[in-house]
Image (cartoon, rainbow, N blue to C red):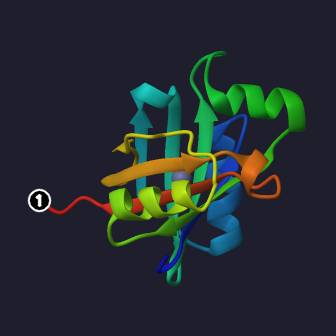
C-alpha cells in the first residue's frame, strides 16, 4: 500500500459539510460526484498528499445511512492507494482478511475500489483504491 489516499467522513448534509470543511481548510472541494451504485453523493478536498472525502447518503439503503443511524456522523473509512488492486486483494485474502468487494468496482474520483470488512481490521473499514488510467 502506497499511502493514505483519502479519509472518508459520513455526513448528513453534504452542502452544510462542504461549507464547514471549506472554512476549515480555507479552500473549496475540487470535485462533487454522485456514485449511483453506492447511493451516495461525495465531495473531495485536497489536503496535501491525501484527501478528505465527504459522503452523504441519497437513500435509506445506502451504507452511509446505516452507518449514521448506528454511529452518527464521523470517520467512516480510510482509503489506501495501491498500484495493483487485484494482486493486493489476492494477497490480503490469503492473509485471512475478510474482503467485502471481491471484484473491485468503479468508485468516486476515477478509482477502482474494494473494501475490507472492519471485523477483520480492528473495527476500521479499509478501502483500497487504484487510479483508473485511460
Ligand atoms: Zn472512499
User: Looking at the image, which is closer to me, 125 or 60?
Assistant: 125
Mark 1 neighbour class, 10 Å CA radius: few under 14, some 14 to 19, many 20 or more: few
User: Looking at the image, which is closer to me, 117 or 47?
Assistant: 117
Question: Whole-percent x and y of residue 75?
Answer: 76, 54
Quadrant in which residue 16 is drawn: top right
Q: Compared to 107, does 127 lie above or below?
A: below
User: What residue is shown at x 63% (from left), y 46% (from top)?
Assistant: 98
User: Looking at the image, which is closer to me, 106 or 43?
Assistant: 106
Q: Is residue 5 visible?
A: yes
User: What residue is shown at x 57% (from left), y 23% (from top)?
Assistant: 58
User: What residue is shown at x 84% (from left), y 26% (from top)?
Assistant: 69
Image side of residue 25 versus residue 12, left or right: left
Question: Whole-percent x and y of residue 102?
Answer: 44, 40
Q: Which residue is mark 1?
A: 134
Please, which residue is most extreme toward the bottom here?
48
Secondary structure category for the residue under label 1:
loop
Point out the image quarter for the C terminus: bottom left
Please, which residue is most extreme toward the right here?
71
Question: Whole-percent x and y of residue 55?
Answer: 60, 43
User: What residue is shown at x 74% (from left), y 52% (from top)?
Assistant: 120
Image side of residue 130 versus residue 66, left or right: left
Image side of residue 2 versus residue 73, left or right: left
Amino acid at each position: 500500500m502506497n499511502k493514505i489516499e483519502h479519509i472518508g467522513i459520513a455526513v448528513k448534509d453534504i452542502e452544510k459539510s462542504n461549507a464547514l470543511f471549506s472554512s476549515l481548510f480555507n479552500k473549496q472541494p475540487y470535485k462533487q460526484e454522485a456514485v449511483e451504485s453506492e447511493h451516495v453523493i461525495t465531495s473531495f478536498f485536497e489536503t496535501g498528499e491525501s484527501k478528505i472525502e465527504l459522503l452523504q447518503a441519497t437513500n435509506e439503503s445506502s451504507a452511509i445511512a446505516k452507518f449514521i443511524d448506528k454511529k452518527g456522523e464521523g470517520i467512516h473509512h480510510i482509503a489506501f492507494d495501491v498500484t495493483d488492486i487485484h494482486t493486493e486483494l489476492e494477497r490480503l485474502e490469503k492473509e485471512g482478511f475478510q474482503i467485502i468487494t471481491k471484484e473491485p468496482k468503479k468508485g468516486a474520483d476515477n478509482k477502482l475500489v474494494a473494501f475490507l470488512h472492519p471485523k477483520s481490521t480492528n473495527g476500521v473499514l479499509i478501502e483500497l483504491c487504484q487510479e483508473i488510467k485511460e
